[in-house]
Amino acid sequence: MKKSKINLRKLLIVTLVMAMVLILVAVVFTRDKKVPGVADVCSEQVLVSNGDTLSGLLSEQGVNGRDINNIAEILKQEAGISTLRADSDKIIFMRPTDDAPVNKIVLACGPWKQVELSCGEDGRWSAQNIDIEKDTRVVKRRGEIKDGDSFYVAGIRAGIPAGVLADVYDLLAFEMDFERDVRAGQEFSVMFEENYCDGNRVDSGKVIAVSFDALRGHVEMFRFKKSDGTSGYYDAQGNGAVKSLKRTPINNARVTSSFSSKRKHPVLGFTRAHKGVDFRAGTGTPIPSAGAGKVVKKAKDRGYGNYIKIRHNGTFETLYAHMSKFAKGVNVGTNVKQGQIIGYVGSTGLSTGPHLHYEIIKGGTHVNPMTVKFPSIDNLDSQNKKDFIKYRERLEEASKLLGSDESLFIQL
């Protein structure tokens, strides 16, 4: 009986010792898992709302007026931030303890950029711009034009984001007339970037490749980075896909009257040449310049109404008529870029409704914008062309793979 009590006592002692060891191990393990300093930092995250201002949010956190002015100036000078965006920007305020002043501020301005502001021991604030690394994936979406479809409708149905479609329009407008070249049964595909952060899709990136079976022939364009670090779009042979002028300045606009040597004028009532193409669009629709050049005429007359004429080089000029108003800063002598807004659709002059009348003059003679050939502005040299052909072949192999399953992606 006595021996039994001794054994029981030993068992209790061993159990207590083991329990203490386990507790000690757990404490040590927990301490090892701590990140030095982080546990002692108090932070508060604020999502910017309508009516919020930087000074107001800083003041709420106890930041004094002098520091508020310094922080605002630093953000403007070093990060290019002068205003906050409601329901988008987030601010994290950090301090060593609950009752200590804020000594670090993190401003998340969009998914790919944040600014860290730190207050040093001398009381001075400094900023560091931090670019968030993107997880960029290239995907492929295929579609077909159905009866009654526009390319836009078919593209959205195929799962192509609206922003990507806008870029595709800009590219195809160098080769296609969206009114005449798009018919039911045509197939198309687009390879484009999708940007992810922490496994979540955030936005879309660049168009990588486009393929379209248009009436005038198969159109292909590929994005390629040249040896000098610049990128452009090229056809399958490496010729520049971007031309000096666009056939259709306004994307997705319906052609209401074509180029013709004989057309009955809707206002005057008699037959005469229609030296351009009319695109129906709502009043106020922005009109981009079809190419880079210099404004040589900005005027108003009885026929054209408000119009602008641009000289692009020694060969081509373009004219844009019936504008409701001109864009600010666009005057005779102004150099404009391709795609720069020069005015807005209207119905001034001899017009029966809002539309853009668009003309192209080649060597002093009016030509049909839908059939004239435009020169490329960025052809590849021999070495870059060799590199492009190899790249295009690899991209085409990847395209076949992506075409088999829309859940697949590649990373370039």
Image (tube, rainbow, N blue to C red):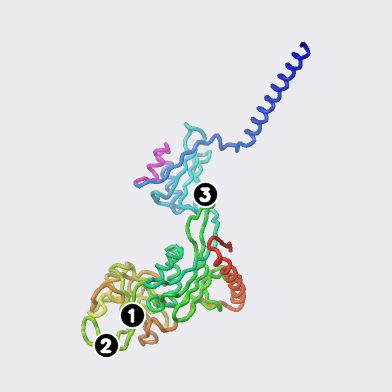
Q: Describe residue 95's horizontal placement relative to residue 264 as left or right.
A: right
The disc placed on residue 277 is: 1
Few, some or many C-alpha atoms within 10 Å of disc 2 (few <14, some 14-19, many ≥20)?
Answer: few
Q: In which quarter of the image is residue 295?
A: bottom left
Q: Look at mark 3 in the image and give the residue it sits on.
A: 128
Q: Residue furthest left?
A: 268
Q: Which of marks 1 and 3 is nearer the N terminus?
A: 3
Position of the N terminus by quadrant: top right
Q: Quadrant of residue 335?
A: bottom left
The disc placed on residue 272 is: 2
Give the label, 1 or 3, closer to the camera: 1
Q: Which residue lies furthest to the front in this view?
A: 1
Q: Position of residue 182 (x, y in %)?
A: 41, 76
Q: Is mark 3 on a helix, strand or loop?
A: strand
Q: What residue type is labelled 2?
A: Arg
Queried whether the magenta region covers residue 346, the answer comes back as: no
| Residue 19 against residue 143 in the figure, above or below | above
Q: Can residue 337 be seen in this view?
A: no
Q: What residue type is labelled 3?
A: Gln
Q: Which of marks 3 and 2 is nearer the N terminus?
A: 3
Q: Which of marks 2 and 1 is nearer the N terminus?
A: 2
Residue drawn at (34%, 71%), measured in percent from left and top? 287
